[in-house]
Image: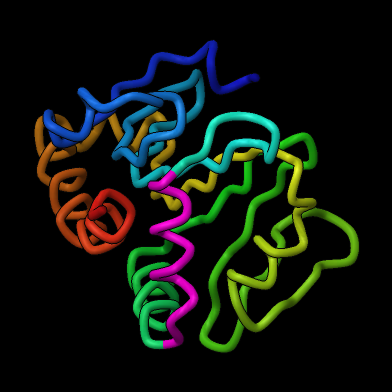
């Protein structure tokens, strides 16, 4: 996994972190690579043959409610967030006023809900869903210590997603 080789920090509730199945726990993350800084929320879906993920199941139950998907859509648009479905067939999705779109070159796919994209991933394929902001390296450096405030503000806006995933 290309993301495993990049410096990354996770932020979670300490009581939640101590539970079993840490690979599939919902979390906030901050990751850097040679070109950019990424930060946001991640939740993982294991394969059907592996460990169950109550975080994933809770998140999907939350997302299945139309008003919650709308909240997520509005967050993505307002904060210019990208949704990454990191799997064997990974891709980036960008929210717009009316739908979610792939940002890949070639023919873009448009679907009216994030849930539709998620449901199109085969049930046996594990993957991570990341909702993140991206700042290119030069802008991140120019922000100086203010970058911590930017990250904290986004994490605060993403708390409802985290709470939905970890509340059992």
The quadrant of the rendering that contains the N terminus is top right
Residue 111 is situated, as x and y percent measured from the top left of the image, at: 71, 78
Name the spot of residue 95 as percent of width and height, x first. Answer: 54, 71
Nearest the camera: 155 or 44? 44
Left or right: residue 52 versus residue 54 is right
Answer above or below: position of 122 versus 93.
Answer: above
Tell me what residue is drawn at x 14 percent, y 46 percent.
152
Q: How is the image coloured?
A: rainbow
Residue at point 45% right, 86% down?
66
Q: Residue at x 51, y 55 (%)?
A: 82
Quarter of image, res 63:
bottom left
Q: Position of residue 56 (x, y in %)?
A: 46, 50
Question: Any magenta on residue 55?
Answer: yes
Say above or below: 106 vs 3: below
Instruction: Kindly report the secondary structure that dominates the magenta region of the rendered protein.
Output: helix
- Closer-to-camera residue (35/90): 90
Write down the quadrant of residue 74 in the picture. bottom left
Tell me where residue 107 appears, x and y as whole percent: 89, 66
**Left or right: residue 110 compared with residue 138:** right
- Left or right: 78, with 46 as reference point: left
Tally of marks: 0
Rendered view: 97 above or below 129:
below
- Span highlighted in magenta in the image: 54-66
In-front residue for pair 150/158: 158
Q: Is residue 40 above or below residue 161?
A: above
Residue drawn at x 42%, y 43% is: 42
């Amino acid at each position: 996994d290309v993301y495993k080789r990049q410096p990354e920090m996770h932020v979670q509730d300490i009581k939640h972190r101590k539970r079993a199945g840490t690979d599939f726990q919902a979390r906030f993350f901050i990751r850097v690579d040679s070109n950019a800084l990424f930060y946001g929320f991640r939740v993982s879906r294991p394969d059907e043959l592996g460990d169950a993920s109550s975080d994933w199941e809770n998140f999907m139950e939350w997302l299945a409610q139309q008003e919650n998907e709308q909240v997520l859509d509005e967050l993505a648009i307002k904060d210019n967030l990208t949704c990454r479905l990191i799997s064997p067939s990974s891709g980036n999705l960008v929210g717009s006023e009316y739908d979610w779109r792939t940002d890949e070159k070639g023919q873009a796919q448009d679907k009216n809900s994030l849930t539709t994209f998620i449901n199109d991933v085969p049930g046996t394929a594990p993957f991570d869903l990341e909702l993140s902001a991206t700042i290119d390296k030069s802008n991140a450096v120019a922000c100086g210590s203010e970058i911590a405030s930017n990250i904290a503000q986004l994490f605060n806006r993403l708390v409802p997603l985290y709470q939905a995933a970890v509340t059992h």
